[in-house]
Image (tube, rainbow, N blue to C red):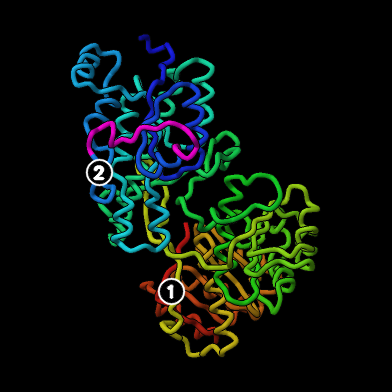
Amino acid sequence: MSTDTPMPVRRALVSCFDKDGVADLAAALAELEVEIVSTGSTAQVIRDAGVPVTEVADLTGFPECLDGRVKTLHPRVHAGILADRHDPEHVRQLDELEVSPIDLVVVNLYPFERTVASGASDAETIEMIDIGGPTMVRAAAKNHGSVGVMVEPSDYDEVVAELRAHGGLTTALRRRLASTAFQHTAAYDAAVAAWFQRDEPFPAQLSLALPRATELRYGENPHQAAAFYTHGVAEGLAAAEQLHGKELSYNNLLDTDAAWGMAVDLDEPCVAIIKHTNPAGYAVADDLEAAYVRALEGDPVSAFGGIVAANRPIDRVTAERIVEVFTEVVIAPGFDEDALEVLRSKANLRILAMPSAARPEGDWQLRSVAGGLLVQEADVGAEPWDAWEVVSQVRPDEATLADLRFAWTACKHTKSNAIVLAKDRQVVGVGAGQMSRVDSVRLAVERSGERHVGSVLASDAFFPFRDGPDAAAQAGVTAIVQPGGSVRDEEVIAAADEHGIAMVLTGRRHFRH
């Protein structure tokens, strides 16, 4: 048979954990005079649909055993799948062994990842490691020159349509299905390996199984292709429900992730306004509207075209404030109906609802470099406030300490070298991404207008020289929080004492490159 000739399907093996569409598929195959072989509960679904079915045990002459662990692991199954129909010797051996070929394998696997996510015990999880299913899938995919294989119910209609149109499966379709099958088993094995590696901080072999959620219009720039892959479970942005607006872009997703992480890092009503992953505004207040107004005051010019994130459901009055400024995305743990009506008046505004205002949990962060990936733990979790050390002669009062904690939280979400000025738990100036720390101080002061007077300053890393604290003090900053650890710490602390300002060391750095 020429490889360009559609391959007839006379016998199909159907064994699916996910029974969605199985009855209709079986009926269509029966209509096409395809003999169906099946196992256990799948066979029952087919039988209940009024379609004739042969049990695998009748094919093999061997009963299912070991609580279903062994059903299809038999030469009469795998010889029928793996025989190359274009090889006369393979065909001769099938005849000699009285093994009938299997032309189509329809299998999907035990829900391993769903079982893990449910919090199941180790014993229950191990039972969801499929053995026979992946073996059949890989065998059929390897032998796609002679066999079709389906692992996704979404492929059923296309396969049936091709059988009806051509009397068989074309080479191109069999090859595509084989590719899908190998991706499926590779992702499955990666998920199992990752489960076994869950207690290893950085395993020797990193196993990733990331399903593609969607292709994006383009990447950071229009000439770059891009896609969004998820962990396969509903968490983070993968859990967001888009209620309105254009599709999200690559840059939207980056900025929205930054905004959401910042907004939910505080317990009080909080709003973060992000531009290019840096805060253009960040504030807390007694209610969300006030928090938005205060965040917008941080840098109303840079807020244009930004991302707004809130840690409370958005009400109508807050929505009315938001639509006064051109905004790309609004993300929050819910929206009042009146708020949605207001926000939807902007045709292109993307509205994302999160299931809750939960903080991001600890996870790996992956970043590509030429030739590989850099992997690190995410910089999340509670700050060790008790470890802070006041090293200056002036001691901050409780109100100043509250501002220092707020500024430190904002600084953690700002690109290095990061300097954040805050007053009354409102960001009033930001210096981000500068090559020199003192330049970040000067930029933050410049961006704050006159609001730097009486503010506090947070620096994501130590001051290598006293020039940064000198510039801050001259601008009217009253207190500084920084990690410490410089060989010139004594000189820097002395500068704070000379200017009569408070200085606190955290002992922890928050670089964000």
Looking at this view, is 114 or 253 the one in front?
114
Is residue 414 rendered to the left or right of residue 42? right
- The answer to whether residue 5 is seen in the rendering is yes
Examine the structure image and report whether residue 327 is included in the region drawn in magenta: no
Which amino acid is tagged 2? Val
Q: Secondary structure at mark 2?
A: loop
- Horizontal and vertical percent position of residue 128: 33, 52
Please give the name of the residue rendered at 60% of the width and 67% of the height, measured from the top-left corner.
Answer: 263
Secondary structure, mark 1, is loop
> Mark 2 or mark 1, which is nearer the start of the sequence?
2
Q: Is residue 497 above or below residue 369?
A: below
Give the residue at mark 1. Answer: 483
Tag count in the figure?
Answer: 2
The residue segment tinted magenta is 46-62
**For residue 115, which quarter of the picture?**
bottom left
Q: Which residue is mark 2?
A: 70
278 or 461: nearer the eye?
278
Left or right, 361 with reference to 39: right
Q: Quadrant of residue 267?
A: bottom right
The structure residue drawn at horizontal position 62% and vertical position 74%, both measured from the top left corner, is 422
Q: Going by the image, does 278 lie left or right of 7?
A: right
Above or below: residue 332 compared with residue 480: above
How many residues crowd mark 2 within 10 Å: few (<14), some (14–19), many (20+)?
some
Q: Residues within 10 Å of mark 1 (few under 14, many from 20)?
A: many
Could you tell me the amino acid type at mark 1? Pro
Residue 12, given in percent of the width and then of the height, sits at 39, 28
| Quadrant in the picture for residue 257 | bottom right
Q: Would residue 470 appear left or right of 379 to someone viewing this image?
A: right
Q: Check the picture and name the quadrant holding the N terminus.
A: top left
Residue at (65, 44) in percent of width and height: 247
The extreme top residue here reads 2
